[in-house]
Amino acid sequence: MLSILRKARLKDKEMRILMLGLDNAGKTTIVKQIMKEDVSTVSPTLGFIIKTIEYEGYKLNIWDVGGQKTLRSYWRNYFEKTDALIWVVDATDRFRLDDCKEELHGLLLEEASRLVGASLLVFANKTDVNGCMSTEEIKDGLKLDEIVSHKWTILRCSAMTGENLGEGLEWVVTDAKERLFLY
Amino acid sequence: MDAVPEDRDVKALKHSTRLLEDINKRLSRLLWDTKQDGKEPRRTLRARVNVHDYHKIIHLLESFQEFPQLLDPILVECMGNLTSGFSAYLLTGRDEAETVSDLEDRSAVNIIAALGQLLYVWMKVRGPKVVLRFLYNDPKWLEPMLGVFENSDKLIDQSDQSADVLNDVIEEKVETSSYSKKTERSGLSWHLRYVTLIWISHILYTPFDLITIADEAASSPPVPLVKVPPMPDGISAIARRVLTVACCSIHSAGKDREGASAAIVRLVVRKDVYHYLLDWFIDWVSTTVAICVNGNEKEDENGVVYVYLLMGLLSALSGIFASGERSIVGGPELLANVYETIVRELYADASGLIAQNAMLRKTLCKLLRNLAYLYLPPPGKSEPQDGPPEQVEEMIDQLLRFLDDRDSLVRYAASKSLSLIALRLAAADRSQIFEAVIEMYDTDVLYPNRALTKLEPKKRYKKDLSQVSVHLWHGLTLTVATFLRFHAATVSMLPKVLDCIVTALVFEQRKATFATGGNVRDAACYAAWSLARNYKTEEMMAERCIAPYPDTMTLPQLLAQELVNAACLDPIGNIRRGASAALQELVGRHPNMIQDGISLVQAIDYSAVALRSRASTDVASKAAVLGDACYWDGLINGLIDEWRGIGLQDSAGRIIAAKGIGSLAKIGILELNRRDEVWKISRNIIKRYGVGPTLDIDVRHGSWYALADIIFSLINELEGKEPKLLADILAEMKDKTGVFGIFDSVKPRDFVHPVLKPEMTCEAAAYLITALSDAAKIMCAQGRPDLPIPLLRRYLCVIDSALERWEENVTTVAVYAAERFFLHMNDRYRAEIVKLWLGKSRARTRRILVVKALGAVFRFFNLSKEEGTGLSMMQQDIIDGILVVSRSPHIEMRVAAMSALADGIFPQGFVNDQILQAVYRSLIDYSIDSRGDVGSWARIEAIRAVLSLQATRPIDISTPDTTQIRIFHKIIALSAEKLDRVRLKACDAVWKITAQEKDWAGGIFQGITQESSFWVNWDEYFETMVRILSHKPAMQAFLEGYATSAGAGSDSVMRSSTRAIQKYLSGLPAYPGTDGTVALSDIANCWIKIVGDAVASGDDRIVVPSLAMLGNWFESHLIERLEAGPFRFADIFPGAPSSRIIN
């Protein structure tokens, strides 16, 4: 049963992506913007929502997980495991950058075995706002250089204008091509 | 039925990098011989490869079978090595095969055989399609490849056994069997033939005309066994050669048949060949089909087995239709010809050949699919208005029939073919097929007669699935899942579809000894997942549930409830996980449609449901309180279901289910305020197992456990906190459910009659009585009337029957029940019962539980403080009784006596010399019967008793000549004896007893902890333990025990112990010095004493191994060292002349 499903997933080029980050980082807005939905009305996500985005022939099943602590349940399930992580940071929120770092590292540490093999894309969101942090600032603040267990990258983006969102997905898909759908 | 805890794929990924490097390095070393030639290292291909290295690589590769993608990083390099090795080999011209100097040489094999197998394993693990990309496709390789078959005698000598060596086949050379070997196998293994044929098929993709590659006939073409019809004129020589080679394998039972079909497919669909060969091939297939289907022969006169020939030809045919261009293979006349002469014949299957072989049917499924594609317009073009052609409908019909196949292989294939064909159809036709699938669910379903009975709605729609085919349901559910994946069901069909999924989620069929239907439920989880994923919220919400479900319920909510039940309650771990995944998908895709969906998903997660015990208790309890408790009802009723929960076939599962019922009932009463419902459910539980002819003993076992667990979980929660409330609830339960009178309707024979599984009844009854008497006590304490005497007497009878049993499952439960029940009685009754038990224990039967119960109730007769500290009359009687039992002729009884001492008497801190004597006797119990060394049970139990005594009254090991010291020495002896179980238990005891002694804890056992490897590594164990010989008082006892290990133990024990003692002895001085340390002569004298005593008492058990041990000492020249002193060798055989050994 499972092997059939795995084959089907490979054939359909399906991926499972977890979208995480502190609350109010703009995760849902990013998903909505990518899906070209109305981004002006977004309320805090309770729990999680699954959306499928078709991108370059790939089916990206994005699990948009609300900024809550009890996340463990979503890491993997019987049918699929997580292929990529998207961590969204609010680039205007200097105060909580430290919290954000703690969360991210805690997550990677605690769930190392379940997330093994997933690459990590950090989205520095809300860069359309004046006075936001620079990429370097966020990279240092989050201590991304200390992460060796996962392949990672950081991108500036804006959920409101849609800037760089496509590039982010591009990175995820390219990475997946290298790892998952090599042949 | 718990799921595998650790995720294997995670583990594999973690360790893969190292393994991959290893494979890569080893592979190139295996194939190439690198010589430093001048400055440039020069690689040459080895002629023969090392078998050991080869196996190592294969082993490593195969460990990636389930995670093939991990191999990708080294794919390029490894394939490069293999292909260049293969080609290098083909290029080296050779006139004749290398003769093997030593035929028996099994350490190295012919390289071409090894290359073939390596490539095959890569194809197997990573998939042939991926590996193919790395094979050379230059047409110049075609001839050398053909040469592998045409000149096979030049590659591998006929006598070369490389292939057999690689596969670890050791064949006797029998002259008679060599006939077929020589003609057929021609020395090539099937791996090599498969790989080469696949490679040939790959090269045949070349766009150049074959005639330009080569046009010479083979000098010595192999002769196929199959009767190949004469090839048409005009076909080029090279094509003829390919065909000949392929035909040699087309009837093979091995995998090379697939290679042969692939080669034929590629050849036949070539633009420059099909004119000649396509019709010719189809004629060949139809002739063969006619012979196979209409005749009764299994093979032809050359020994070609028809089944395999047909399989090869049909898969080639299917391949031709799949990969040939429409303009070549799609002509209506050709299709009609094939359909009439081949497919229809196969449908008819006059000889039953197809029906007998699953692989054939699978091939047929694939053929039908590829044929159907050609009947339908190509993708992108719309279908004609009047629906698919008649032939396609027939094929779909046939595939639907294959969904009920008895082989899952065929069901999978049929389901896949069906859904792929459906994808090519217009939406309306697709829905029609889907409807047909859904309707097939109703086959053989029995409904109650709705017109006549006035059943409640739930029952009126109750389906009786006992007659349906499990296979069909599996096939159907699989198909539903794949159809849902591409949105084939119209919205109006969803309620019916959901009904099917929900029914499939709880599908089970009982057979006499096992249950089937797990695959149906597994597929149902997949279907539920597909439904949730591929339908929009609006679509799901558009319709309401149909009967029997309440029409107020939405579809997602209904599905969620059923998935919650499956995720918590299913007996199979993977189904629980599947259901949990489907639930996640449902909640995530349809936000706010499921009550408390998010919390539900968090409670029921992947890892939480892995353990069955956790899923049906903790997880179910968490889920039960969510969403206004809308899941509680389904969960608790699911646990008393027809087939799940207490209806399960295995008793462990029922006990777990009962625990679940207990916790859910507690929640129902205390948190959800649903007392009345709980009482109703309890009454249902009592009704559930039926009476008279409908009585189900297994279910009764589960039911009683469940009732008891309801009581226990209430007591655990409220006792101490709110005793008043607890008593009220229990009293209400007593009145409303009548559970206290439950044994009134049980017949006495249920507890004894062997056919009625009395041990199961006894176990559950004892458990329930424990609960009931605890409950009664609590109510009594709150001022409610005690249970009436007749009821108590009845309970006592039940306990007595349970104590008559001897089975393991009853033991703990029954003894505990007896102990708890004792609390409920006054002294007069207690004394009466003990007298009764004492009488029973003396009878010459195996009433082991009675003895254990005597031990357990010992404490109830303790004297009160005013009366002093001695023994009461009753206690003296009990001890006397146990001592009598300890001399019983039945080993089980003797063991039970030790248990009674260990569990009942010693914890009270009482001991006397008589008891110690009894323990000592048990320690030297070496009785043997047809079951083997049954005395070891007594020895182990006695050791446990000693440890139990040690806990309250530490053993005195310093005063000599007491029973206690004799016991201690005996345990030391046991710590070196040959039986592993006994030895470890004894050593553990010695270690614990001596924990406070300086000599021991600080000396022999220094640094040993519970986790030390000492306990599992025999070498280390004996090397440590042998030092006990230096402890003079214990020397004799220990050496005596040691002899049994060193002289008669199992191989590994004997080796370790012999090595340890010889090492120890060689370190000793020959004769004692002045410091009083142990010397070799002491050991030798000790040995003489042991053997002397043993001979005197005629104890072969010690004499024989002791002599063996001494023999070893002589062999290793240890004893010779004594020649320098006064040791008299003659003493070694003091009693020899008179002993029986000489005889």
Image (spheres, coloured by chain):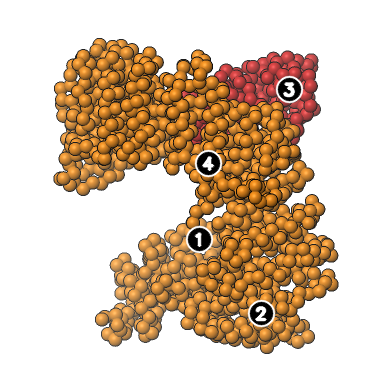
Chain colours: A red, B orange
Three-letter amino acid code of the residue under disc 3: Thr
Q: CA distance from mark 3 to mark 1?
A: 60 Å
The secondary element bearing badge 1 is classed as helix
The x and y percentages for residue A41 are: 79, 22
Which label sits in the foreground, 4 or 1?
A: 4
Asked whether the residues under marks 4 and 1 belong to the same chain, the reply is yes
Which label sits in the foreground, 2 or 4?
A: 4
Picture disc at residue A29: 3
Picture disc at residue B858: 2
B718 and B1103: which one is in front?
Answer: B718
Task: Determine whether, in the image, residue B150 is placed left or right of residue B378.
Answer: left
- Residue A33 vs B612, above or below: the answer is above
**In this orientation, does residue B207 appear?**
yes
Number of other residues with Cα within 10 Å of mark 2, as a class: few under 14, some 14 to 19, many 20 or more: many
B108 and B115: which one is in front?
Answer: B115
First in residue order: circle 1 vs circle 2: 2
Asked whether the residues under marks 3 and 1 belong to the same chain, the reply is no
The x and y percentages for residue A57 are: 56, 19
Q: CA distance from mark 4 to mark 3?
A: 49 Å
Three-letter amino acid code of the residue under disc 2: Phe
Q: Could you tell me if the residues under marks 4 and 3 are in contact, i.e. CB atoms within 8 Å?
A: no
The secondary element bearing badge 2 is classed as helix
Which label sits in the foreground, 2 or 3?
A: 3
Number of other residues with Cα within 10 Å of mark 4, as a class: few under 14, some 14 to 19, many 20 or more: few
Picture disc at residue B1015: 1
Tag 1 subunit: B
The secondary element bearing badge 3 is classed as helix
Three-letter amino acid code of the residue under disc 1: Trp
Which label sits in the foreground, 3 or 1?
A: 3
Task: Determine whether, in the image, residue A95 is placed left or right of residue B450.
Answer: right
Number of other residues with Cα within 10 Å of mark 3, as a class: few under 14, some 14 to 19, many 20 or more: many
